[in-house]
Amino acid sequence: MSSAKSATTPGSGRALSVLIVSTLAFTVCFMVWMMFGVIGIPIKKQLGLNATEFGLLTATPVLTGSLIRVPLGIWTDRYGGRLVFFALMLACVIPIWLMSYATAYWQFLTIGLFVGLAGGSFSVGTPYVARWFPKSRQGFAMGVFGAGNSGAAVNKFVAPALVVAFGWVMVPQVYAAILLGTAILFWLFSAHDESHVVASKASFGEQLKALKDPKVLKYCQYYSIVFGGYVALSLWMVQYYVGEYGLDIRVAALLAACFSLPGGVLRAIGGWLSDKYGAHSVTWWVMWVSWICLFLLSYPQTDFTVTTVNGPRTFHIGLSVYGFTALLAVLGVAWAFGKASVFKYISDDYGQNIGAISGIVGLAGGLGGFILPILFGLLMDLTGVRSSAFMLMYGVVWVSLIWMYWTEVRKTELMGKNAPASPMSRSFAR
């Protein structure tokens, strides 16, 4: 009994070890999951793919990584995160290695489906890590674990160097070896607590009935932006920089990491902010910052002519590579906070069923990450405008802002005895 208590103490060495090694494992899994964001560029050239086919190629691993999240979340509740996480990593090693032998488009798509299983690791690690910490620290703990999203940035540092030095074939071989080593480290330094296992006999279908809950659907919508959009843009941005600004793949990947890195690492700060100010406040501001950034990013490179007193004069409007990268970095920070705040909603409202609910919400976010790159490619093929990807995301954020206003903000009493205290009044109260 005493050992169980110590395990859940915020300063517990065992809890800290679980958090660190789980975050490492998730980072590597996410790096593998985002592999096509870099190696897809030479594969696209090799196979002569159009933008839509490239979008499908990059999105294929995201599909299985999303669909597997619900059962993985439920299995984590039943059997414990340590066993499920370890088995998941081992199951991905061989498919990743086989990727280096693919030559045809259908082979890349098929093997990509199996590689995508690594993306389901989030719905395993989230409830696994959360249960080692008290409720008041769960937002921070899940935020630290969620910083493993920075694996998307690690991929942009490692994969381009391997592609340039040895060709894209070396990337899946190196990644398979890294994942195997990480699985062994995870097993050695993680732990299992029987008290964290949820004795639920509900079937998958019964647990999926949570989708009838309007709050769950709303959290799915939020997460399809802050996570689905993050995944989609992480996959899309390297080739965007190459096509829009004519950059080398290494420089393009480095600049794209300005979005991916803060979008992963700063998730822990989002968890802390959500613990302190509440999930609603953080998510509300995240949506507004996203709306502004996406509006500016949506504007295509434009030349227009104005008739002046001195004759026709042509003006150019468009973001430079520096302005574009700065806005993208701000968007990455906002979505890092948003990913943490959405899961703070879940831990607050569904504390006894985190695994299943996080799996469902994670599924929605992952499906967003699967559908969006395909739509990005389709829009670019139809319009020829690269920034149409941001136009689409801008519209999706509008939906969330309206939904959030009608279900949360509109019901908040701004004045009176039930109004929430302002930060200023809280400071006076102290």
Image: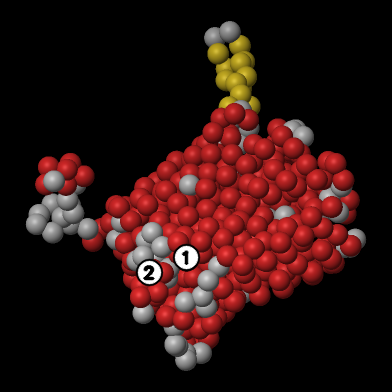
> How would you rate the neighbour count of disc 1 (Cα within 10 Å): few for under 14, some for 14-19, many for 20 or more?
some
* Residue 385 coordinates in the image, percent (x, y): 67, 42
* Residue 283 coordinates in the image, percent (x, y): 38, 54
Query: Which quadrant of the view contains residue 409?
Result: bottom left
Instruction: Identify the residue at horizontal 16%, vertical 47% (top origin).
Output: 426
* Residue 115 coordinates in the image, percent (x, y): 73, 66
* Residue 202 coordinates in the image, percent (x, y): 47, 90
The dot on residue 14 is 1
Instruction: Identify the residue at horizontal 59%, vertical 76% (top origin).
Output: 83
Seen from the viewer's position, the closer of residues 164 and 104 is 164
Instruction: Identify the residue at horizontal 53%, vertical 71% (top origin).
Output: 191
Quadrant where the N terminus is found in the figure: bottom left
Q: Amino acid at mark 1?
A: Arg
Taking the view exactly as shown, the residue that stands out farthest to the front is 2
Instruction: Identify the residue at horizontal 65%, vertical 57% (top origin).
Output: 28
Q: Amino acid at mark 2?
A: Ser
- Asked if disc 2 and disc 1 are in contact, CB closer than 8 Å, the reply is yes
Secondary structure under badge 2? helix
Locate residue 190 relative to residue 160 in the image: left or right. Answer: left
Between discs 2 and 1, the one toward the N terminus: 2
The dot on residue 429 is none
Secondary structure under badge 1? helix
Residue 343 visible in the shown view: no
Seen from the viewer's position, the closer of residues 180 and 31 is 180
Locate residue 100 relative to residue 329 in the image: left or right. Answer: right
Locate residue 275 relative to residue 176 in the image: left or right. Answer: left
Query: What residue did someone put label 2 on?
Result: 6
> How would you rate the neighbour count of disc 2 (Cα within 10 Å): few for under 14, some for 14-19, many for 20 or more?
some
